[in-house]
Every structure is written in structure tokens, then in C-alpha cells.
Image: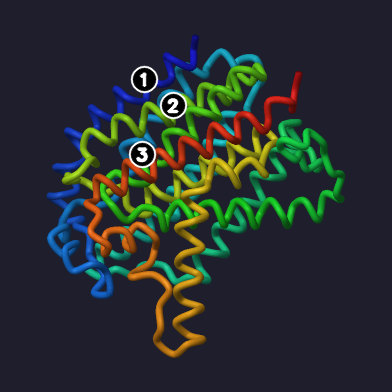
Amino acid sequence: MRFLIGLVVSFAVTALLGKIVIPWLRAMKAGQSIKEIGPVWHKDKEGTPTMGGIMFMVGITAAVFTAGLPDLMQGNYGAVIVLLLALIYGLIGFFDDYMKVKHHQNEGLTAPQKFLLQLAAALVVIVLLRNTGYLTSDLYLPFVNTTVQIPFPVYLAFASFVMVGTVNAVNITDGVDGLASCVTVPVAIVMMLIAILWQRTELAVFAAAVCGGLFGFLLYNHYPAKVFMGDTGSLFLGGAVAALAFGLDIPIALIFMGVVYIAETMSDIIQVGYFKLTHGKRVFRMAPLHHHFEMGGWHETKVVWVFTLVSLAGSLLALLGVMGRYR
């Protein structure tokens, strides 16, 4: 039952930190800048404190080192390795957010800078997971219940691509009050269930801590949001989701669990590509996908609820698909 302790600790720490962090961010004038090309009604959100992801980063870390302490004492470091990747990505996001706040604009680190930092972090953690026995280079195929053996250098390239892609997909999803948090909750819950079923207690504690941290953050991030997670939070969450999938050795399951992340990212890619090919025509009213539905008349809360239900369905499908991984 330690995963429940992890959930409660993470929730409590995150919720309490909101009372401290949000006023501090306001005092620091760490307000969100809204892109001119974004929805005009989002301009009302300008000035809302960002970098709120700090709250659940601390909450989740506290849960790992309290509820997860018995596992650490026994030499099971899976939760710490997963947390390490998430924290590195969170720090990259924090630096990006800080640059935006400092220069009062919506651009921080350049795309190449972000990519190189994210790639380096992914490579380090993949090797750590491999060397500690959490990860093999056998690619498990859900539903088919079989594995494909590939050389580790090839697997390393594949894993790095998936990790960096997942992190940035979660980042793109964070565009409506509460959306990234709510969409990620079902993913974390299903990963927690998988970890419990497979007796990966340390990873179950981490996944539960992610749930608790997000619930605590949603107290302040639900519509209308009092704080945004910023790149600090969205990159941390992306790292947590990706590292959990690899820690459980089921990266292909991200196709189902991350269906919303993938749809959001693909809508952006399709929109930009089609716009350039047709010299100005668009497939969607606006990209990413959540803005397309907003432009179609959906309220932010409807977008969040529908996308969360889609994420829940995809996550449950992933759970069914990997049930045969360990009998």
C-alpha cells in the first residue's frame, strides 16, 4: 500500500506549496506571455504565473524519498532513475521559462539547444535503466505478446527518439487550463496498475506520486487557472511518462497511452507542412488540436473532459495490450 502513501504525500506537498509558490511567482512577475498567433481569447490569460510545475516536481520528489525509501534501502533504484530523467527535463524547462520571464517574451531556449539537452538526458537514463536491469533491448509488442530482438545501439537510437518525442508532445499538449495535467492522470494511473501487477513497487510509488502531484496541482490549474505549469512542468511530465514506459519495458504501449499527445503533435506537424506546401492553406482551424476545437466553439472545459476521456480509453487499451508481458 506504499503507493497510496506516495500519492497522498505528493498531493499534500503540492497542494501546500501552491500557497507559497504562486504568491512568490507573482512577486517575481513570472507571468505567462501569450503568442500573438494564438487564440485571441487567450490574451486574457497573459500575466498568469507560470513555472508552477515546480510545485508537483517537489511533491513527487518528496513522495519518492519517503514512500519509496524501503525500496531504496533494498537497492531498487528504478524510481530514482525515472525521477532523475523527469527532473533533468524539468530543469531544462525551468531554464527555458526563466529566459522567457526575464526577457518578457514567449521564446526561451532555441530549438537546437533544447533538442541537444533533451537527447543527452535521454541517452544517460536509457543506459542507466539498461545497466540496472530495468530495460532490455527486446522490443515488446502489445497484444501480439511477443518481443523483437534488436541490437542495443539501434534500440538506444529508438529509445532516445521516443523519449525526446514524448517530452515535446506533452509540452505541445499543455495549451489549455488543466489539459496536460488531466490527460496525464489516466496514463499515470494505468502505469501504476501495471507496476503493481508486475510487482515493480518502486515504479508504482513513482506513478502514484505523479497522480498525487497532478491532483494537487489541479487545485490551482483547473479553469480558470491561477497558475500554469510552464515548460518546467510539461517537460517534467513528459520525462516522467517516457521514463516510466521504459522502466516498465513497454515503450510501444505509449502509442495507446499517449494517443492525445500524438494527436496534438501530429496536428501541429500536418498544419505546418500543409501550410508550406499549399502556400497558406490549412487543414485545421488552428493547431495544435485543442485550439482547433476551441475555434469550433468548444469551451476549454469541454476540450479537457473529452481529451481526458480519450486518454483514459487509450490507457485502458494499453493495459489490456500488455497484460501478457509477465504472467
Q: Residues within 10 Å of mark 1 (few under 14, many from 20)?
A: many
Q: What's the CA distance linking mark 2 and mark 1?
A: 8 Å
- Tell me which amino acid carries mark 2: Ala
- According to the image, label 1 marks what residue? 9
User: Could you tell me which residue is drawn at 31 percent across and 62 percent down?
Assistant: 291
User: Could you tell me which residue is drawn at 65 percent across and 15 percent down?
Assistant: 74
Instruction: Tell me which numbered mark, 1 or 3, is placed earlier along the sequence.
Output: 1
Q: Residues within 10 Å of mark 2 (few under 14, many from 20)?
A: many
**Residue 232 at x, y percent in the picture:** 37, 50
User: Could you tell me which residue is drawn at 19 percent across and 62 percent down?
Assistant: 42
Question: In terms of secondary structure, where does tag 2 sit?
Answer: helix
- Choose top left, top right, bottom left or bottom right for residue 102: bottom left
- Tell me which amino acid carries mark 3: Cys
Instruction: Tell me which numbered mark, 2 or 3, is placed earlier along the sequence.
Output: 3
**Residue 267 at x, y percent in the picture:** 46, 64
Question: In terms of secondary structure, where does tag 1 sit?
Answer: helix
- Choose top left, top right, bottom left or bottom right for residue 58: top left
- Tell me which amino acid carries mark 1: Val
* Circle number at residue 182: 3
Q: What's the CA distance linking mark 2 and mark 3?
A: 15 Å
Callout in the foreground (1, 3): 3
Question: In terms of secondary structure, where does tag 3 sit?
Answer: helix
* Circle number at residue 209: 2
42 shown above or below 12: below
Q: What's the CA distance linking mark 1 and mark 3?
A: 19 Å
